[in-house]
Amino acid sequence: MNLLVREALVSFRRTRTLSALSVTTIAFALFVTGLFGLVLVNLHRALEEVAERVQVVAFLKRDTPSQTISAAMSDIAAFPEVLNVQYVSEEEALQRAQRELAEFQSVYRDLETNPLPPSIELSLRPEDRDARHAADVADRLRGFDFVDDVRYGQDWVQRLDSLRNIAGLVGLAIGAAFALVSIVITGVTIRITVLQRAREISIMRLVGATDWFIRGPFLLEGAIKGLLGGVLAVLLCAGVLVAFKAQHIGLGIGLAFFGAGEVALLLAFGVLLGFTGSLISVGRHLRRV
């Protein structure tokens, strides 16, 4: 293992310019992938913020006994999809309408009787904020005798599901394309390194070195280059995000950067790029000599 590490580090020193080119190439390949990843992260965050507004509202019949409502709310809170249950009385509903619907304040102020019914508002768990689960909860609520109507914004919840599906498919397709391009670019760059050391590989072959002994330093070198390229790509992505926020303060203030998991994934992808590129390039060369 010490020999493997030493040979990889010696190779870095011998080919500093080419090594720097390899690291830079991997970094920019990952940088493009990282920028697309940032778009996906923030798109996913925006969709989740919209999904937090998904609610199922059960409008109740007037004069329903409070004991009946309390007992039903305990049963509803036990639904596996439900995160929170809140009772809204007729008076609270009217106050909310007067506060949120400013254009109708004068209309609500002159009413002799309150036209708004009491209701039970349900917030769903994050993993259940979709049209299918909202519809299931709504159907169960309709089974209560004192429930007059149930609403959950069916149309826009279905549109939200469609946006999620489209974002997922587009992200998968473009992400795979970027990954493939990154692998090709990295492989070509490392291939240049291998060709530059072709004579050294031939001599090692002549003295009886096995293929895996020859591959070892190249594979470790490629993995290190991939890691360094990944670190540089993360820094570039962070710089772009900071610059965007500085230039578009109103738009960029809510943008998020990668979490620890996404950063680790990008670095691991860089290591995989370098390792795979070295493995393919060295393998091809060894089959020809």
Image (tube, helix red, strand yellow):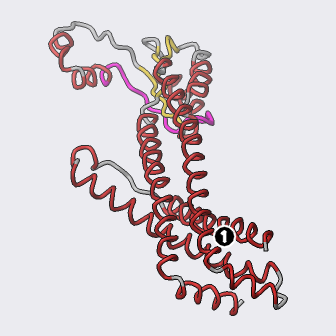
**Under tag 1, what secondary structure?**
helix
The segment highlighted magenta reads 78-92
The residue shown at (47%, 45%) is 40
Of 212 and 230, the residue lying toward us: 212
68 sits left or right of 106 in the view? right
Q: Residues within 10 Å of mark 1 (few under 14, many from 20)?
A: many
Above or below residue 42? Residue 65 is: above
Q: Judge whether residue 110 is colored magenta.
A: no
x, y percent for residue 204: 76, 87
Of 62 and 287, the residue lying toward us: 287
245 sits left or right of 74 in the view? left
x, y percent for residue 4: 69, 87
The residue shown at (58%, 40%) is 173
Of 132 and 23, the residue lying toward us: 23
x, y percent for residue 255: 34, 49
How many marks overall? 1
Q: Which residue is mark 1?
A: 278
Residue 273 placement: quadrant: bottom right
Q: Judge whether residue 86 is colored magenta.
A: yes
Of 243 and 225, the residue lying toward us: 225
Amino acid found under the numbered disc labelled 1: Ser
x, y percent for residue 158: 52, 22
Residue 1 placement: quadrant: bottom right
The residue shown at (28%, 52%) is 244
115 sits left or right of 83 in the view? left
Residue 138 placement: quadrant: top right
The quadrant the C terminus occupies is bottom right
